[in-house]
Image: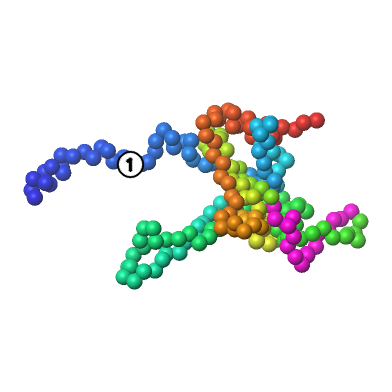
């Protein structure tokens, strides 16, 4: 026993580092709030995303992405702990939470699942409630674009998204108003309704400059 302690005292344990930082770390850190989009698509002919055309508006406080599988642990007599291969995936949820600072007809209708009404006040549009959720109320290709430290984008797209948070906005003295949007992902109407149609795009071997150009080119304003 005494010899064991002497041996331990002579070890330096240099293989154990104080952090997990490697040369890949800067390329894998997401930084900044990102942007949210409606109808976000990639044009293969132009090799670019429709960033500017799909942008919904400015946000405050960032955007949160949450994707969670629903799991069921199979119960077996005599089993006292969770057992490998005895857990079944029974479903999943995916949602994005953000805070909008731009109050527009589009974002209002999205939040309340509303519709355009007939305005009796000259110079005003009116948005009203409706009784049923229609096919067009599901937002096609609702997306989020974030950035890694080196400028490469990370892109998340829900094929079908519906706002489930409603509209709640509070005006305060010396503060700008914001309202929360919770967008949940929905499967297509088909017999194969066992997974959600979300997609997470990460750049591969493409250079940072090429990826940056694919985003920036879609933000250029043409005459």
Q: Point out residue 32 in the picture as x, y percentages from the top left corner.
A: 56, 42
Residue 62 horizontal/vertical position (percent): 59, 49
Q: Residue at x 36, y 63 (%)?
A: 82
* Residue situated furthest front in the rendering: 191
The quadrant the C terminus occupies is top right
Q: Nearer the viewer, residue 104 or 194?
A: 194
Q: Is residue 105 visible?
A: yes
> For residue 162, which quarter of the picture?
bottom right
The residue at which mark 1 appears reads as 18
Mark 1 surroundings: few (<14), some (14-19) or many (≥20) residues within 10 A? few
Toward the bottom, the furthest residue is: 77
**The image quarter in which residue 163 lies:** bottom right
At a point 41% along the width and 66% down the height, the residue shown is: 74
* Residue 218 screen position, x and y as percent: 69, 34
Taking the magenta stretch, the answer to whether it contains residue 222 is: no
In this rendering, position of residue 34 left or right of residue 17: right
The scheme the figure's colours follow is rainbow
Residue drawn at (28%, 41%) of the image: 16
Q: Give the extent of the magenta segment.
A: 123-139
Left or right for 118, reference 49 = right
Residue 173 at least partly seen: no
Q: Seen in the image, is 132 located left or right of residue 91?
A: right
Residue 168 appears in which quarter of the rendering?
bottom right
Direction left: furthest residue: 2
Residue at the image position 75 percent from the left and 65 percent from the top: 132
Task: Out of 134 and 78, give the one closest to the viewer.
Answer: 78
Q: Is residue 212 above or below residue 64?
A: above
Percent of width and height locating residue 198: 59, 50
């Amino acid at each position: 026993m005494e010899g064991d302690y002497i041996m331990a005292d002579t070890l330096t344990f240099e293989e154990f580092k104080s952090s997990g930082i490697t040369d890949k770390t800067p390329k894998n850190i997401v930084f900044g709030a990102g942007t949210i989009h409606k109808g976000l698509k990639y044009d293969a002919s132009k090799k670019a995303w429709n960033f500017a055309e799909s942008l919904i508006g400015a946000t405050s406080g960032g955007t949160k992405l949450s994707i969670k599988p629903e799991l069921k642990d199979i119960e077996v007599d005599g089993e006292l702990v969770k057992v490998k291969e005895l857990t079944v995936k029974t479903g999943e949820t995916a949602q994005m939470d953000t805070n909008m600072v731009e109050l527009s007809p589009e974002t209002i209708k999205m939040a309340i699942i509303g519709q355009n009404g007939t305005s009796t006040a000259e110079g005003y549009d009116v948005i009203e409630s409706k009784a049923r959720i229609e096919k067009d109320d599901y937002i096609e290709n609702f997306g989020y674009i974030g950035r890694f430290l080196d400028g490469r984008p990370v892109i998340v797209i829900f094929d079908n998204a519906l706002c489930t948070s409603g509209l709640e906005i509070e005006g305060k003295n010396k503060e700008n108003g914001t309202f929360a949007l919770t967008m949940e992902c929905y499967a297509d109407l088909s017999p194969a309704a066992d997974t959600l149609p979300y997609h997470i795009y990460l750049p591969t071997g493409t250079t940072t400059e090429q990826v940056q150009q694919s985003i920036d080119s879609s933000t250029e304003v043409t005459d």
